[in-house]
Image (cartoon, grey):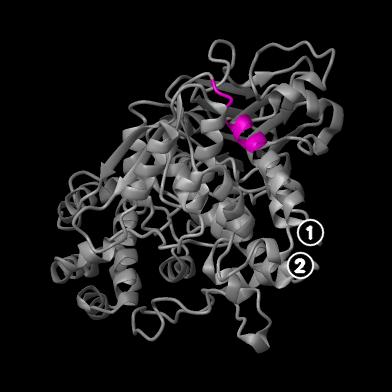
Amino acid sequence: MCGIAGMMMRGGAAVPRERLAAMGRAVAHRGPDGAHDHVAGDVGFHHARLAIIDLATGDQPLHDGAGRALVVNGEIYNYVELRAALPGVPWRTQGDCEPLLALYDRHGLDFLAEVRGMFALALHDPGRGRVVLARDPFGIKPLYYAADPDGLLFASEPQAIVAARRAASGANHQAIRPEAAHELLQLQFTTGRDTIFAGIARVLPGEILVVEGGEIVERRRAPPVLPETVRRQPERAALAAIDRVVMDSVALHERSDVPYGLFLSSGIDSATVLTAMTRLDAAPVRSYTAAFPETGVHDERETAAAMARAAGARHTELPITAEAFFARLPEIAACLDDPVADYAVVPNFLLAERAAEDVKVVLCGVGGDEIFAGYSRYRRQALPRWLGGRPRRRKGPCDGLDLFRTPMAGWRDGIAAAEAETATHAFNGLQRAQALDFADWLPHSVLVAVDRCLMHFGLEGRTPLLDRAVADFGFALPNGLKLRGGQGKYLLRRWLADANPTAKPFAKKLGFTVPVGEWIARDGARLGDLVAREPGIAELCRPATVRQVFVSPDKAHRLLAWRLLFFALWHRRHIRGLAPDGGTLACLDG
């Protein structure tokens, strides 16, 4: 996993080195183990390396005999099998990404069809005068681009594109889209291709862009799951199959030349990964769990510790307090340049900091809820309308409040567009709900949060349940093997009950939460006043309503107070350009 950035100029213009250098500095935290450039005429690439596989010869950009150059952020997990299927290639490295060049040479733009991994990449093909940008089907690894007047820029993080623009113009201002800010406060993330930054877009999950002369000339896209598929099978056969696909995926995701560990919660998904790792590994698994002492939220420590003891893991518990929350929140908001106001960013960030003391890779259970239908909302969405089924995200915490200075129009447009897209496939109701999460919630909220919080500390996050083989299997399961007895993830629970009964997989799901509302309420009046006066909030919202939200005991208002606080700190760093020095109160009062 690494950081990439680059550009292709219009009209054959030479690459401006100072802009490429500015982009490199902006992604340097993603790759502390080395940085290299590829510059050829109108194309410039930068690669900041986090060395995980092939520590000796795996530096990028990679080149082949045809003059092509490749930079990749991510890991290709089935690289051993891909190399074996490509006899006669004069390999220059022992790494996981080099097979992509050979696959492109043989298959052109179809070169990713057999790849299992997480990746965002840029490939320069001077023979065809083009740059190819691509992203893995789940959007595990990020990639952004901007079509500027003098060429197309791309990077692992939007802030690198902002840095390149600043280097070109000297201006320190980056505009945001107000409608995206409304969407962020309603949903906790932004949807679709367009980011919150004006003129900066996402390469969508599974998308390939072809760039010629600094302009996008072709788009292709592969879906994360196979459409129009339900495979009916007896439960016994399905249990044997899930054992094969889960064990195979975890084994591939453990390929590493550096130490690795696991983020362990009390939930089904991380318990599944722990169970597989314990079977596969001779050495004890290193596991890490967050806890929230002296708060009213469910604490995961006891269950996670019991699972870790049963597995013989080397277990670390990290208590997170209100003091740590307020001290570190400006830094957390600063690392999320593509903003995600999910309170899970707090434990993600602090656990990553602790785990990075021991390991360079952590596995986690992200994706299990989406693949195997774990969310309680799926049970409602799977029903037909006449039985109470309803679309998701019809409301948000801003509803009914005189919060915004301009009408909150169109905040649900991105969700509606994804709903329209999924309606074109012959999915059942449950699959439509899952597909909607694959479109936006997973890549633009959950995975962005994991990527930024971990990469801030040079830590690679791996998601073995978000694997092509696991997804093809899980998505195609009939509803009865996903939902049963008022619970989701039935088949995964059934497998885990046999493989690791300590996990208590059929116990009632208590859910994961972070007590941000409780912490904010302790000094709500003061925080509300400071947030209301912050320029980013003052431009968008009515100050009196903001103050009202921060002192309200209503649960939805507490959620909104958290999002407003996050957005105020985010705007301060990424729009106003102020450093996240000091704690929350110091930043807001400065």
Instruction: Report x, y in % for residue 358.
Output: 36, 26
Q: Nearer the viewer, residue 285 or 553?
A: 285
Q: Are marks 1 and 2 in contact (CB under 8 Å)?
A: yes
Q: Secondary structure at mark 1?
A: loop
Q: Is residue 26 magenta?
A: no
The residue beneath circle 1 is: 227
Q: Is residue 517 above or below residue 235?
A: below
**176 on left or right of 565:** right
What residue do we see at 67% from left, 71% from top? 419
Where residue 261 sits: x, y (%)? 44, 31
Q: Residues within 10 Å of mark 2 (few under 14, many from 20)?
A: some
The single residue placed furthest to the bottom in the displayed view is 386
User: Dot 1: few (<14), some (14–19), or many (≥20) neighbours within 10 Å?
Assistant: some
Q: Please identify the quarter of the rendering in which residue 106 is found.
A: top right
The quadrant the C terminus occupies is bottom left
Q: On the image, which quarter does residue 185 sit in?
A: bottom left
* Closer-to-camera residue (268/457): 268
Task: Give the CA distance from mark 1 to mark 2.
Answer: 7 Å
Dot placed on the residue nearer the N-terminal end, 1 or 2: 1
Relative to 171, 142 lies left or right = right
Q: Which mark is residue 427?
A: 2
Which kind of residue does numbered mark 2 sit on?
Phe
Q: Is residue 39 above or below residue 375?
A: above
Q: In this orientation, does residue 531 appear?
A: yes
Against 379, residue 441 (above or below) is above
Is residue 4 visible in the rendered image? The answer is no
Q: Which residues are magenta?
A: 247-256
Please tell me which residue is depicted at 32% across the width and 49% down the height of the picture. 302
Magenta-drawn stretch, dominant element (helix, strand or loop):
helix
Q: Amino acid at mark 1?
A: Pro
